[in-house]
Amino acid sequence: MLEYLGKELALRFRIGGVEIALNLVVAAVAAGVSVGLVLLALWLRRGLRRDPDTPLSRRATVLAVTVDLFQNQLLGGISPRLARQLLPLVVTLFFYVLLCNWANILPIPYIVSPTQDLNVPLGMALMVYGLTHYYGIRTKGVVRHLKGYLEPFPFLLPLNIVGDFGRTLSHGFRLFGNILGGVLLTTVVAGRFAPIVVPAALNIWFGLAMGTIQALVFTLLTVAYIQVTAD
Amino acid sequence: MDPQAIVEAAKYLAAGICMGIGAIGPGVGEGIIGAHALDAMARQPEMANTLLRTMVIADAIAETTGIYSLVVAIVLIFVV
């Protein structure tokens, strides 16, 4: 039953006594989602016209609505300069996490959500952690950025450092735990108790609804973390 | 009694207790967040969008400890 969680198709190799398992299914689905997003973006971009006076095509309208939504809803509270820099990252991250969460509801065996493997969410959380430092240094300079760790009092420095790690860890674990919990529940119920209608309802809630909410939360927290250090 | 059987029994019991107690805190916390957000939205409906965004973030942060206990429970069942 649980072999559908994709743990069986792992590529194992040893580097210096440490066994490393590369989960091929997760890597393939994650790469597939990336390729799909790039193709979707290219397809949508072809709808843009050079001449700004012509009426908007359908694809251009989709783009405009998306950008407008993200600018007003997610990036509404931060300074316009930083919002402009963050917009591509935030839109990409949202749709990547969203499609990764939704990959699980495809009725194909062995296709799993990449986000139910801890490596994917934690990798994205680490990327966001790096970006907070990047934007912090870029907007405030190295000295003022590092001085931020001494606030509000210098003796809180250890607490600030631990808080940084805890924040990153919980950022990754939150997405992982939510998606894996939903997947486990759906798999167990479908395999043991009610194989016909109930899994579909569970998929709608845990796959579609929770996937969207968690993608939104992940992006919102990304914006919040970068805003705290950089704005 | 077989020691392996005791470990087996203890791990399911531990997972259940971990998840059950771990869900209390986030449940209470999210209830408080939702109640206060509704209060604020009823008072100032024009702020509803901003409040909703802040509420979702606060919910996600309140949920973190619950997710930790879920991860611990999953580790107990599938890894130990």
Image (tube, rainbow, N blue to C red):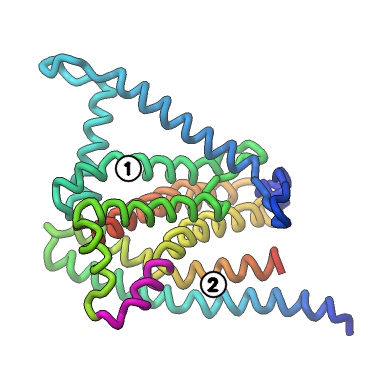
Read off the residue under disc 2. Answer: B69
Residue at coordinates 29% horizontally, 23% vertically from top-left?
A: A59
Q: Is residue B16 left or right of residue A169?
A: right
B9 within the magenta span: no
Residue A116 position in % (x across, y down): 56, 52
**Circle 2 residues within 10 Å: few <14, some 14–19, many ≥20:** many
Same chain? Circles 2 and 1: no
Read off the residue under disc 1. Answer: A89
Q: Is residue A89 left or right of residue A230?
A: right
Helix, strand or loop status at disc 1: helix
The residue type indicated by label 1 comes to Leu
Q: Main secondary structure of the magenta part?
A: helix
Q: Is residue A131 left or right of residue A126?
A: left
Above/below status of A8 relative to B64 = above
Quarter in which the C terminus of chain A is drawn = bottom left
Q: Is residue A228 visible?
A: no
Residue at coordinates 24% horizontally, 37% vertically from top-left?
A: A67
A155 within the magenta span: yes
Question: Which-is-in-front pick, marks 2 and 1?
Answer: 1
Gap in angstroms between the C-alphas marked 2 and 1: 31 Å
User: Which stretch did the figure color magenta?
Assistant: A154-165
Q: Chain of mark 1?
A: A
User: B46 or A134: which is nearer to us?
Assistant: A134
The residue type indicated by label 2 comes to Ser
Above/below status of A65 relative to A231 = above
Residue at coordinates 53% horizontally, 80% vertically from top-left?
A: B21
Residue A180 position in % (x across, y down): 56, 56
| Residue B37: mark | none
Residue A136 position in % (x across, y down): 25, 56
Helix, strand or loop status at disc 2: helix
